[in-house]
Image (cartoon, rainbow, N blue to C red):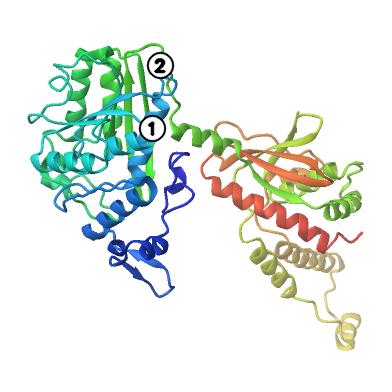
Amino acid sequence: MALNKSMHPRNRYKDKPPDFAYLASKYPDFQKHVQINLLGRVMLNFKDPEAVRALTCTLLKEDFGLTIEIPLERLIPTVPLRLNYIHWVEDLTEGQGSSRRGIDIGTGASCIYPLLGASMNGWFFLATEVDDICYNYAKKNVEQNNMAGLIKVVKVPQKTLLMDALKEESIVYDFCMCNPPFFANQLEAKGVNSRNSRRPPPSSVNTGGVTEIMAEGGELEFVKRIIHDSLQLKRRLRWYSCMLGKKCSLAPLKEELRKQGVPKVTHTEFCQGRTMRWALAWSFYEDVTVPSPPCKKRKLEKTRKPLTFTVPEATAAELHTQAASIGSTHSAPSESVTAWLEKILTDLKVLHKRVPCSESELSIFLTAVENTWIHGRQKRREHGRQLRELPRAPPPTNHDSDNTQQAPEGANLEPHSNEEEVKGQQSSERGTDITMETPSTESPCKQEEEQGGSAPQGPPSPAQQFLFKCLVNVKTEDCDVVVEMHWVEGQNKDLMNQLCTCLKNSLFRQVATPVQN
């Protein structure tokens, strides 16, 4: 169910997926297709066409009061995915009144789009079909649900899309829908030459007749034919739309519409389980409202959502008390927390600087050039181990003292030379100790601090690579201090997540083990 959170917000299955256990207890035809795994969960085999058909028929009956029949040799639609399309058409035609009229190109045996649109919204539909079996089942499904007053199913010749279906019509329709054949040949249908080798195999069965899943030139040429018809019909329909099975089809179709000078074009994504579909819509009406693609809305929401952690009032007060140990004399707890964050960032060699912000918060702009925050515990343990293993000089013995004081007669004493040699040895020993206690690689920031200089804490030069940049806001909320990290740009947001965790742990560790003055 990886993509369910990206469903249309009004999709009833977005936050409440079907309860297989409940459906199995209520519908015997569905129960015989479910299995219970070792964890006691009710499972369904989506590679079994009969199980998929049972689920579709059960959901339509339970949630929409629709009774349908679908032959196994024809396309078995999934209800949540089709519901996404219906809701998107609602968005496209918003404000056009309740009695909307639509066309379903190739309605299929289930006639699912007209049945959903009519039962949910009272829409009128002209449903076209070229396949004899699909046509007969579609008519039967409409009649047994008492929808003949809203849905008209018509049999049309092969390769008929819009022009021939509307040649005797004078009605202006609000929209058309189409689930075109995705594939150009059997190899594509089986995923031999179109599916990325790194992708896992499909998790569900692929059913459907030849006219439902394959067309000359695949979905790209099929939709181009609809575009060609729309250029002649133009304002006979307010919105033209198609669902796509391949993302690579979207860009060339949008380019085709641009070349033809179509004034209004939009697209969206349909998500369900592990399945992703794309949809394209265009209009020749200047006054229609074009909804923003949900994919863009999700990206905007993601940019507005920062990583956040809270420093409780008691912890913030303790950090404020200890702030003097790092030279901070601020009066507000939020300022002290900010000072501690700056110290931690300096220790981590993360470039940072204060930036102007509102009066109610403090802001730090940081640029991470290298990942210095992972494996912090291992690094501390290794440093402690190195300190414990430092070589210790043995205490001087009386024998050594005597040897030093009583030199043999006739020896050539060279006091200056010996003193320099001893000093050199001592200096060498001290140098060895220092080398082992101090990390072998120090950043330029650290070296400049030791020399009394000010470490550069702004963003690196354009030529310098960086992992990510973010803005840290610190503010007080209900006596607690809240720290927010807003992504700006970079290679991987997981790195910011790691740093956020490191900053939080470092602050709380400081309270547990305060600085000794």
Left or right for 264, reference 294: left
- At x 7% / y 31%, what residue is drawn? 158
Q: Label 2 is placed on what type of residue? A: Val
Say what secondary structure mark 1 lies in: helix
Mark 2 Cα-neighbour bin, 10 Å: few <14, some 14–19, many ≥20: some
Give the residue at the far bottom of this rendering: 399
Find disc 2 in the rendering and name its residue: 288
Rendered location of residue 504, percent (x, y) = 71, 53
Say what secondary structure mark 2 lies in: loop
Find disc 1 in the rendering and name its residue: 121
Rendered location of residue 129, percent (x, y) = 15, 34
- Residue 152: quarter of image: top left
Residues at discs 2 and 1 in contact (Cβ within 8 Å): no
Judged by depth in the image, the label closer to the viewer, 2 or 1, is 1
Left or right for 322, reference 501: right
Disc on the earlier residue, 2 or 1: 1
- Residue 314: quarter of image: bottom right
Quadrant the N terminus occupies: bottom left
Left or right for 51, reference 399: left
Tell me if I can see residue 189 in this picture: yes
In the image, is residue 393 above or below residue 501? Answer: below
- At x 40% / y 16%, what residue is drawn? 288
